[in-house]
Image: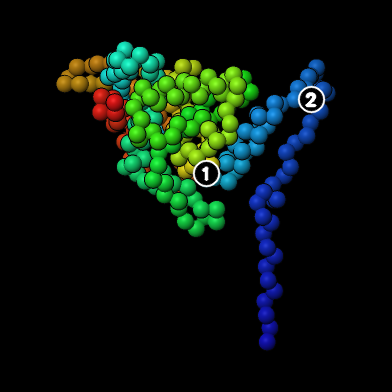
Amino acid sequence: MSTKPEAPAAPAWPANLPPMPVMDFGLFGEVETVPLPRHQKLVASFLARNWAQIPHVFHQDEAEVPGLDAARKALAAESGVKVTQVAFLVKAAVKALQAFPRFNASLTPNGDGLVLKKFYHIGIAVETPNGLVVPVIRDCDRKSIPEIAAELAEKAERARTKGLPITEMSGGCFTISSLGNLGGTGFTPIINAPELAILGVTRTAERLKLVNGQVVSVPVLPLSLSYDHRVINGADAARFTRCIADALADPAALA
C-alpha cells in the first residue's frame, strides 16, 4: 500500500518575509543617531504587535453637529468646568457601545470566544512629552459630560507632568483619538488591543447642504473608525459609526 508523502509545512508568518533593510546612512551625508525614550519604544512594540496581528478595516463617516458647540458652551457655563468636544464624544461612544454590544467586547486569548463587557470604560489618547498615553475614564455611562471633562483634564495634566500608573491606563473598552485641535480630514488609528475598535476624530469642517431648496453651510465632524474584522463586519461598523454621528447631532440628549 502506497502513501503520498506529506507536503512540507508552509513557513509561519512572518518567517517568510525578507528582513528589514540595514543601511549606513552616513554614506550619503551627515547624520546623528539619538536614542528613543523608553516609553516610546514600549508603545512602538505594542503598536507593531497590534498592526501585525489584528486585521484592521477602516470606516469613514461625518456627523452633522450644528448644535454641538453651543451645547458645549452652555454646559461649561452651567457647571464651571471646561467642557471639551471629547467629553461629548465619550458619551456618544457609550450610547453606540450599548446599542452594539459586540463592540464592547474582547476576544478570548485563544480566539474562540468573546468577553462581553457590562461596563463602559473609555480610553482617550493623550500626547505627552514622552509619547502617547491612553488614560481610561471608568463608568462613563454613569458620569455626566462635565464630570467626564473634568476627570479627563485632570488625568491628561498628570500624564503630561508626573505620569500615570498603569492601573489608570488599563481596562478600557474603546478608545478615542482626537486630532481636532491640530487639523486634518481623517486618519486611520491603530486598535488598542485587546479592544476591538478605536475612533479617530479630526477638526470640524463646513459642508454645503441643500435644505428646503436653499444652500446652507453645516458644520460636520469627520469620524474614522478602525475595527477588528475577525469580530466586526463592515455593515455593523457603518451602523455603529452612524449611531455615534446621530448622537452627536443631538447633543442635548447626551447631556
**Percent of width and height locating residue 44:** 64, 34
Say whether residue 62 is visible.
no
| Residue found at x 55% / y 35% | 167
Please identify the quarter of the rendering in which residue 253 is found. Answer: top left
- Residue marked by disc 2: 25
| Residue found at x 57% / y 41% | 50
| Residue found at x 81% / y 28% | 24
Query: How many numbered marks does the figure carry?
Result: 2
| Residue found at x 34% / y 27% | 144
Which disc number belongs to residue 70? Answer: none
**Percent of width and height locating residue 176:** 45, 31
Secondary structure at numbered mark 2: helix
Say above or below: 232 vs 152: below
For disc 1, the neighbor class at 10 Å (few under 14, some 14 to 19, many from 20) is: some
Question: In the current view of this chain or complex, which residue is farthest to the right?
Answer: 27
Tag 2–tag 1 contact (CB < 8 Å): no
**Percent of width and height locating residue 27:** 83, 23
The quadrant of the rendering that contains the N terminus is bottom right
- Residue marked by disc 1: 194
Secondary structure at numbered mark 1: loop
For disc 2, the neighbor class at 10 Å (few under 14, some 14 to 19, many from 20) is: few
Question: In the current view of this chain or complex, which residue is farthest to the left?
Answer: 212
Please identify the quarter of the rendering in which residue 249 is found. Answer: top left
**Percent of width and height locating residue 160:** 57, 20
Type of amino acid under label 2: Phe
222 or 122: nearer the eye?
Answer: 122
